[in-house]
Image: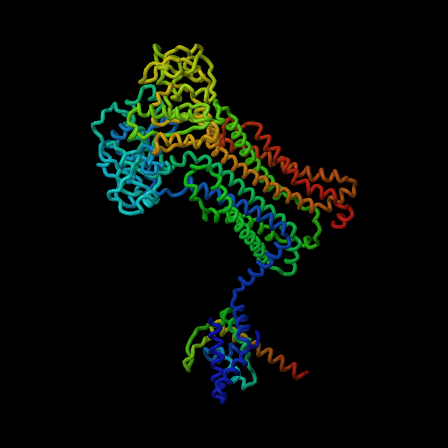
């Protein structure tokens, strides 16, 4: 711009002068332009002068670096691959983990929020409070500015023309305000809504609002939830999420505000949240709640009391508790991979510098300043970092997509995970810093004049940096491999562990009868009875059974072991108290359907009353050293039951936890939620659905094979071991690249020495052995270091393992063997090349 | 020190001027013996500017035209003084050389 203006002014002024000298205007202008010359090319020259010196030199450096890389393409590709894998994997995994562990919660002043309640073994580590605790504590507690409770999230049906299954949660009126939310539209629950007998009200999700009501006015709008006409009073804010991260479509008000409710009334199990008063610390809150907790303990059965604890946890800690260990494991694995790739790049750069000693010496000799050489090295490092970083980001994007696709459902907010630029920046910085460090160091060293000869300088000190980098890589890979081996073995154990049941060609159909339409137990029983009859009549259905829960789950119907006692004997007589007992209400055909073997006595017969069947574990624990048959048990609050049979154990603590003793009661079919088991071919599935529809078109049900149920429970462990396995393989490949690179280069540098050895009578075999021996020593050193590292990391992985000890020899041996083979394979090519050195030519190089 | 730069600095010693003005001054000052080519003038001006010998700013000529005016800086004056001394020596040497040639 300025050049055009300046040159134009110049030409115009000369043209004016020409005109004054008597030329006509056009001629004057032409003459002036001719006199000036080529404006464009002068302009270019002018601009070239304006470019600062450093930029010009940077351009030179960059061109030189690019040419250098283009010449040694293999170096470039290896280094970029190592960088890309390291940066990409770390970035993707961190972005992934960040969503789980460190993302900001959508709650105002989240640090004030706590999750509190009582815990007991029977609750499986989940905190709960009882309805009466909430009523009592709410008024007298001091550490919290507000408290809210929820009865958790469960299925509900919008039973209108088209029944839709939704996720509903009942919450106390203050729930939204505890978390600092305001409704997007309409109003929040008020205290009146929470009074017993008030008309039912609900808040709905934004999506449901748009879907059902077109996002319009809510006044007078209602939804039919499980048969109850419920007024929709407000819309949940867009960023609403439940503290348990469960998805929810509808919040219904929990009506607890009833002062006249008798203490003996059945009590709901609630989950409680609270906001600490400003300035109240967690320990202080715990101290202040302790007297209230001690009070509450009195209402709890004596045998149970010892096992109950008060828990007040920061909301974030509680929320991430389940995924924390897996997330940290991932982070650890990926930082190992990042370290390996940094070591790799460092190694490659050092190797490259060694092979360029002569070039650097020449440049120094013809007058390149040291600072200029250093800048050249810096440029190369930065270029490498930039290309590797770009590759890394691409890799991260791909990996993240893969992780999202493979991750089991229920990992919090995973679909929101995107590349985290802070982490990408950090990884880029770490690797670039490493490449600068290792790229710059050799350039800063004064090149010795001898390097100009290109020959080897006699008496040079031994190389130590590269071998130690290789040793570090091998050690880190070994740690990764051990971890992956342990997890894989654990997964295999989990898959092979006997469940105690037959799952093949079995289906379960699960449904829940809404109280609104089936108020009486008899109605429920009638429904389940006619349903099973209909299902049994379908051709191809070989049998049906009913149960209120299915193995390998079972915690839901748990009881405390010490609450059960033998009739006529004092409680806890010589038995260790504590622990849970799984209770299932099943139909008589349940055992034969699932293939649970009868060990002693007899199974239920339909119409049996007051009988009970025990698992072997239960019988052994309740009646050690005596026969259980014919004994009479008292379950708290229920009639005495006679033990008629003992059956085989089944897994009931999920796939990973230890199984509890189990007792079976004959189902009276009055429960609203039931699993109907069917032995049949998949082809009858539509008929099963049809049977449900005929009986109750407004009911929703879940139909799945038992095999699928079990398989779904394994997704999370499979995901974990797959990830760690992936990283272990990545680490192994990187370490192999590192070892190969170093061996190849060192061997090339020793060509002369090898020539001498051969001239003195060493055979090709001797030379190969020599090279392999060196690689072997490094590998051994790496393995030794890695085993120490693995031992140090063992504790962190312990909790993720099933049926494997961290000290199990098999995965360790496998990892060591795998690494040894890979390392020797990497060293094999250089060893072969060394053995083919022609002595005569090699000697000439000396 | 190239003679061109000496000519530029010398002509600017009389006061700030634009590129065209510099060519005129050199031509007039040398009695028409010396001319400055535009193709080398402007790159030289930029170099001197970058070295800090000159500053430049847009201003208006007497005829009301916008032009870029160059002005000597103190560093430029020092450089001019040195260039004059050096040129005097060169000229002296040249004169002797030519006389004995």
Would residue A778 be found to the left or right of residue A20 on screen? right
Would residue B93 be found to the left or right of residue A194 on screen? right
Q: Residue at left 57%, top 27%?
A: A809
Would residue A402 be found to the left or right of residue A777 on screen? left
From the viewer's perspective, is residue A118 above or below residue A459?
A: above
Examine the rendering and report whether any part of residue A145 can be seen.
no
Examine the rendering and report whether any part of residue A272 can be seen.
yes
Q: Residue at left 29%, top 40%?
A: A203
Of A723 and A202, the residue lying toward us: A202
Of A635 and A586, the residue lying toward us: A586
Of A200 and A515, the residue lying toward us: A515
User: Of all residues shown, which one is farthest toward the bottom?
Assistant: A22
Residue A804: percent from the left, percent from the top? 52, 27
From the viewer's perspective, is residue B65 above or below residue A268?
A: below
From the viewer's perspective, is residue A211 above or below residue A636?
A: below
From the viewer's perspective, is residue A256 above or below residue A608?
A: below
Query: How is the rendered protein coloured?
Result: rainbow
- Rendered image quadrant of residue A633: top left
User: Of all residues shown, which one is farthest toward the left?
Assistant: A260
Q: How many marks?
A: 0
Residue A539: percent from the left, percent from the top? 45, 26
Residue B51: percent from the left, percent from the top? 51, 69
Would residue A802 be found to the left or right of residue A190 on screen? right
Residue A740: percent from the left, percent from the top? 64, 43
């Amino acid at each position: 711009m300025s050049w055009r203006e300046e040159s134009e002014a110049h030409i115009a002024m000369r043209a004016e002068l020409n005109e004054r000298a008597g030329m006509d205007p056009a001629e004057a202008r032409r003459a002036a332009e001719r006199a000036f010359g080529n404006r464009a090319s002068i302009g270019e020259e002018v601009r070239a002068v304006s470019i600062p010196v450093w930029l010009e030199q940077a351009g030179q450096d960059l061109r030189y670096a690019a040419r250098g890389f283009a010449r040694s393409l293999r170096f470039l590709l290896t280094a970029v691959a190592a960088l890309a894998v390291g940066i990409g994997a770390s970035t993707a995994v961190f972005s992934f983990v960040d969503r789980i562990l460190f993302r900001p919660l959508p709650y105002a002043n989240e640090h004030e929020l706590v999750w509190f309640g009582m815990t007991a073994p029977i609750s499986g580590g989940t905190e709960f409070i009882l309805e009466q605790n909430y009523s009592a504590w709410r008024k007298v507690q001091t550490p919290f500015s507000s408290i809210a409770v929820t009865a958790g999230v469960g299925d509900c049906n919008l039973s209108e023309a088209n029944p839709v299954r939704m996720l509903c949660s009942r919450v106390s009126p203050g729930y939204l305000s505890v978390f600092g939310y305001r409704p997007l539209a309409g109003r929040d629950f008020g205290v009146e809504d929470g009074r017993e007998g008030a008309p039912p009200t609900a808040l709905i999700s934004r999506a449901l609002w748009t879907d059902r009501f077109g996002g319009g006015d809510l006044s007078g709008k209602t939804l039919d939830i499980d048969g109850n006409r419920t007024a929709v009073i407000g819309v949940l804010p867009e960023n609403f999420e439940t503290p348990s991260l469960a998805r929810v479509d509808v919040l219904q008000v929990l009506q607890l505000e009833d002062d006249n409710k008798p203490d003996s009334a059945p009590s709901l199990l609630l989950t409680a949240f609270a906001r600490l008063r400003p300035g109240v610390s967690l320990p202080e809150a715990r101290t202040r709640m302790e007297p209230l907790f001690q009070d509450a303990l009195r209402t709890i059965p004596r045998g149970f009391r010892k096992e109950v604890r008060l828990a007040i946890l920061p909301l974030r800690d509680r929320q991430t508790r389940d995924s924390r260990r897996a997330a940290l494991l991932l982070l650890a694995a990926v930082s190992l991979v990042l370290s390996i790739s940094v070591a790799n790049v460092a190694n490659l750069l050092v190797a490259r510098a060694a092979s360029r000693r002569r070039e650097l010496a020449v440049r120094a000799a013809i007058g390149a300043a040291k600072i200029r050489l250093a800048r050249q090295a810096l440029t190369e490092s930065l270029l490498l970092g930039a290309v590797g970083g770009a590759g890394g980001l691409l890799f991260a994007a791909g990996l993240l997509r893969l992780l999202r696709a493979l991750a089991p459902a229920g990992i919090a907010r995973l679909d929101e995970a995107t590349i985290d630029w802070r982490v990408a920046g950090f990884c880029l910085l770490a690797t670039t810093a490493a490449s600068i460090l290792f790229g710059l160091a050799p350039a800063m060293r004064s090149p010795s004049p001898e390097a100009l000869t290109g020959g080897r300088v006699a008496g040079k000190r031994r190389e130590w940096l590269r071998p130690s980098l290789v040793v570090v890589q091998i050690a880190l890979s070994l740690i990764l491999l051990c971890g992956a081996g342990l997890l894989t073995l654990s997964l295999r154990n989990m898959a092979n562990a006997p469940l105690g049941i037959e799952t093949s060609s079995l289906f379960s159909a699960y449904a829940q009868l809404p109280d609104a339409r089936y108020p009486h137990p008899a109605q429920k029983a009638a429904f389940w009875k006619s349903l099973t009859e209909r299902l049994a009549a379908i051709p191809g259905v070989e049998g049906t059974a009913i149960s209120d829960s299915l193995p390998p789950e079972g915690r839901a119907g748990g009881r405390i072991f010490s609450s059960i006692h033998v009739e006529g004997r004092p409680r806890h007589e010589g038995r260790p108290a504590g622990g849970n007992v799984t209770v299932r209400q099943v139909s008589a055909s349940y055992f034969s359907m699932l293939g649970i073997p009868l060990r002693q006595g007899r199974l239920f017969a339909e119409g049996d009353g007051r009988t009970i069947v025990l698992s072997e574990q239960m019988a052994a624990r309740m009646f050690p050293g005596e026969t259980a048959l014919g004994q009479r048990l008292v379950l708290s609050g229920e009639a005495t039951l006679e033990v008629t049979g003992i059956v085989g154990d089944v897994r009931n603590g999920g796939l990973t936890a230890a199984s509890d003793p189990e007792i079976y009661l004959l189902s009276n079919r009055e429960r609203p939620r039931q699993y109907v088991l069917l032995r049949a071919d998949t082809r009858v599935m539509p008929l099963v659905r049809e049977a449900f529809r005929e009986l109750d078109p407004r009911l929703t049900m879940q139909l799945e094979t038992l095999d699928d149920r079990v398989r779904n429970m394994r997704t999370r462990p499979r995901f974990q071991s797959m990830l760690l396995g992936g990283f272990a393989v990545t680490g192994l490949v990187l370490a192999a690249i590192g070892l190969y690179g170093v061996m190849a280069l060192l061997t090339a540098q020793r060509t002369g020495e090898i020539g001498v050895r051969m001239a003195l009578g060493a055979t090709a075999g001797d030379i190969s052995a020599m090279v392999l021996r060196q690689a072997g020593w490094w590998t051994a050193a790496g393995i030794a270091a890695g085993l120490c590292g693995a031992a140090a990391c063992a504790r962190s992985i312990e909790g993720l393992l099933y049926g494997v000890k961290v000290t199990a020899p098999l995965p360790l041996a496998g990892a060591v063997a795998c690494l040894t083979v890979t390392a020797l394979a990497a060293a094999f090519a250089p060893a072969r090349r060394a053995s083919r050195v022609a002595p005569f030519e090699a000697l000439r190089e000396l | 020190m190239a003679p061109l730069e000496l000519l530029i600095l010398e002509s600017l010693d009389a006061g700030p001027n634009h590129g065209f003005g510099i060519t005129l001054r050199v031509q007039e000052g040398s009695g028409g013996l010396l001319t400055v080519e535009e193709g080398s003038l402007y790159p030289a001006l930029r170099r001197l500017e970058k070295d800090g010998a000159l500053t430049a700013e847009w201003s208006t000529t007497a005829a009301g035209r916008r032009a870029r005016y160059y002005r000597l800086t103190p560093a430029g004056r020092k450089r001019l003084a040195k260039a004059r001394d050096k040129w005097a020596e060169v000229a002296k040497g040249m004169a002797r050389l030519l006389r004995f040639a």
